Amino acid sequence: MEITLAQPEGLVVSPAFSHVAVVPPGATTIYVGGQNGVDDKGVVVSADAAEQSLRAVENARIALESAGAGLDDVISWTVLIHQDADLRAAYGAVASRLAREGAPPLVTAALVAGLGVPGALIEVSAVAAVIRE
């Protein structure tokens, strides 16, 4: 039993993302809701998009670990970037954290007009899957 991330023939091949994830029966699926670049008090860590991005992914990592998973178990990321953010800085900072050896996860990214947390420039959410022995 294994989790499969695939880049089917006929679709663009990218080292940054896969197109399809197949999670077999019996695997544990973990959903992480939107994480912003805030500290443990809910305060935005910086006005810098790259710093917020790194903290948002760190917050996702903390959430995943609380459920017995890690960044390498993520099969799908959603990345929302505020339209006023420096796109290269915001996405560039998280891209290296989302990547991994082997088949990359699925990634959806979008520029948005606003986020729920005032001052937030990025929000990430994740779906992870773990096969428990």
Image: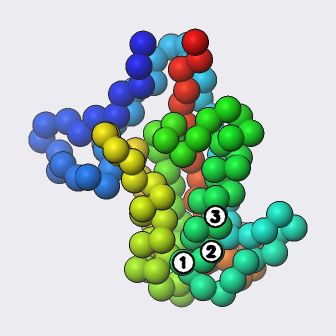
Residue depicted at 39% across the width and 33% down the height:
21
Relative to 98, is 46 on the left or the right? Answer: right
Number of marks drawn: 3
Structural distance between the alpha carbons of marks 3 and 2: 6 Å
Amino acid under disc 3:
Ala
Q: Is mark 1 on a helix, strand or loop?
A: helix
Q: In which quarter of the image is the N terminus?
A: top left
**Residue tagged 1:** 50
| Residue 70 x %, y % | 58, 41
129 lies above or below 71: above
Residue under the point 70% across and 49% down: 62
Q: Residue furthest right?
A: 41
In space, the residues marked 2 and 1 are separated at their CA atoms by 5 Å
Secondary element type, mark 2: helix
The answer to which image quadrant residue 11 occupies is: top left
State the image coordinates of residue 50 (x, y, percent, origin top left): 54, 78
Query: Which residue bears the numbered disc 3?
Result: 56
Which numbered tag is attached to residue 133? none
Image coords of residue 82 (percent x, y): 56, 78
Identify the amino acid type marked 2.
Gln
Question: According to the image, label 2 marks what residue?
Answer: 52
Classify the position of the C terminus by image quarter. top right
